[in-house]
Image (tube, coloured by chain):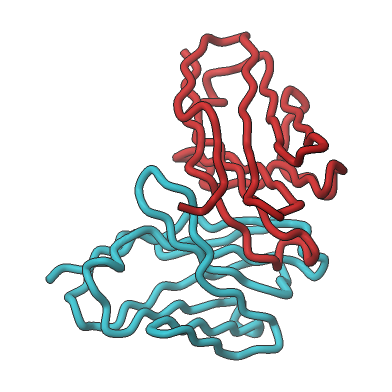
Chain colours: A cyan, B red
Amino acid sequence: SQKIEQNSEALNIQEGKTATLTCNYTNYSPAYLQWYRQDPGRGPVFLLLIRENEKEKRKERLKVTFDTTLKQSLFHITASQPADSATYLCAPLNQAGTALIFGKGTTLSVSS
Amino acid sequence: DSGVTQTPKHLITATGQRVTLRCSPRSGDLSVYWYQQSLDQGLQFLIQYYNGEERAKGNILERFSAQQFPDLHSELNLSSLELGDSALYFCASSVGTSGFTDTQYFGPGTRLTVL
């Protein structure tokens, strides 16, 4: 069955460092991959979408990579700030974009 | 604030009961999506409606049903409730022209507790 795995442990880093979150998938060939941010008790907020033919995508301090050979996406936050503390979810989409599976998320804590 | 509203915010009910969750999409959005988020399963897609028609179905139980009305608001009906249905239920909306690759805007959620 299709499986999405994100860093299972919470990630704790110092302010100013780069946070790297991992999303691995198996038995799945997504055409797109989305990343969301979720704060406690709130709905997810869309951050970035990357297509299978894009190796990398950037938005301000965020960078996402998509390696279809490794079946992995990496999500980087550079110059991290305490305000970046949240849970980050990855969501691969199939070609038709009609199946949406979310990873369980990685909780990032940035300390000052 | 995403512009998506959900009511009620909290709902406590008993096993075997039926509840209705309501969602109003952002102005101009034609697609509505429903999700369930529980601690053990994470966020799961349930169903999508586009302009009143069902467009995509995920892991939605037969005890659950949804509809989208002409004014584009949507309702998710959960019946014969079980303890395991306790979860956060999110509604999201999007413009709707490109399916899931459209940016989805999530509401604040309804927390359902089944006792």
Callout count: 0
Q: Locate the C terminus of chain A by quadrant.
A: bottom left
Above or below for B73 versus B93: above
Residue positioned most to the left: A112
Drawn side of residue B115 relative to residue A72, left or right: left
Instruction: Out of A107 and B4, give the one closest to the viewer.
Output: B4
Above or below for A4 versus B52: below
Task: Point out residue B88 in the picture as x, y percentages from the top left corner.
Answer: 50, 36
Drawn side of residue B4 relative to residue B10, left or right: right
Instruction: Out of B83 and B96, give the one closest to the viewer.
Output: B96
Instruction: Out of B7 and A17, give the one closest to the viewer.
Output: B7
Above or below for A52 versus B10: below
Task: Point out residue B32 in the picture as x, y percentages from the top left corner.
Answer: 71, 47
Which residue sits at x=71%, y=88%?
Answer: A53
Task: Point out residue B40 in the picture as x, y percentages from the top left corner.
Answer: 48, 40
Which residue sits at x=78%, y=37%?
Answer: B68
Which residue sits at x=38%, y=58%?
Answer: A87
Drawn side of residue A45 relative to residue A94, left or right: left
Q: Locate the N terminus of chain A by quadrant.
A: bottom right
Which residue sits at x=42%, y=47%?
Answer: A42
- Residue A3's quadrant in the figure? bottom right
Drawn side of residue B24 relative to residue A12, left or right: right
Above or below for B78 versus B16: below
Task: Point out residue B16 in the picture as x, y percentages from the top left corner.
Answer: 62, 9
Residue positioned most to the right: B53
